Amino acid sequence: MRDLPPSELRAHVLEQTRTQTITPTWFGEDPWQAFAVVVGDQDVGEVVARGRTYVRNGGGLELDVRMGAGDRGAFMGGVLATGVERAMVQVRVMDPDTLGARFSIRVHALEGDVRPRDATPGYLRRAVPRGTYRAWVDVPPRGGRYLVEVTTLDRGGEQVAQAWASPIAVERPWLQ
């Protein structure tokens, strides 16, 4: 994995994500590291089992992703069951190890066997500072997955780190 150019790596991750609920261990290979987002006194094993995880290569990038629709929501690695047409993706990013870090955020929609669709809103198509960002996305008629990719850039615009969040599945309850 470490020798793959970014375009091939992206294609590989998107293809593997079609069949996985959370970011699989095959992606946590050196130099990639897997992280679980633990809040408060949660048990790490339970957090990992639920899939609130991401993988990172380089830097100190910290990432948390959630998706919500009405009164329902799911964190990365979870399942959002909803009947609405649009949902909101919320991405929180920071990298305390990189001075003046900027972040390139991409949202990928995976719908069955159809080619992955770039669902990144226009205002996130440029590098942004640390913070929490929200974007409306269309919910596929038959459900699908949303996968967030984040790249950390230093002051000079050079890539310092890259991360992939565990995908969030969107299911239509009446189709089950």
Image: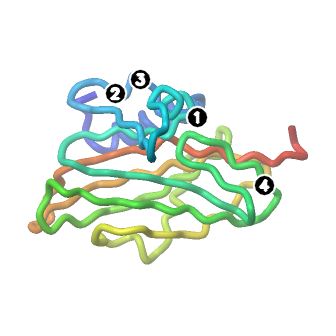
Q: Residue lying furthest front in this view?
A: 41
Q: Is residue 125 left or right of residue 67?
A: left
Q: Is residue 35 left or right of residue 51?
A: left
Q: Which residue is mark 1?
A: 18
Give the structural element (helix, strand or loop) at label 1: loop
Q: Is residue 151 left or right of residue 82?
A: left
Q: Is residue 108 left or right of residue 78?
A: left
In x, y percent, where is residue 25?
A: 41, 23
Q: Which residue is mark 2?
A: 28
> How far separated are the C-alphas under marks 2 and 4?
31 Å
Give the structural element (helix, strand or loop) at label 3: helix
Contact, mark 4 vs mark 1 (Cβ under 8 Å): no
Contact, mark 3 vs mark 2 (Cβ under 8 Å): yes
Q: Which residue is mark 3?
A: 25
Contact, mark 1 vs mark 2 (Cβ under 8 Å): no
Give neighbour class at mark 2: few <14, some 14-19, many 20+ (Cα, 10 Å). some
Q: Earlier in the sequence, mark 4 or mark 1?
A: 1
Q: Earlier in the sequence, mark 2 or mark 4?
A: 2
Badge nearest the viewer, 4 or 1: 4
Q: Which residue is mark 4?
A: 82
Give the structural element (helix, strand or loop) at label 4: loop
In x, y percent, where is residue 154?
A: 14, 62
Q: Amino acid at mark 2?
A: Gly
> How far separated are the C-alphas under marks 3 and 1?
15 Å
Q: Amino acid at mark 1?
A: Arg
> How far separated are the C-alphas under marks 3 and 4?
29 Å
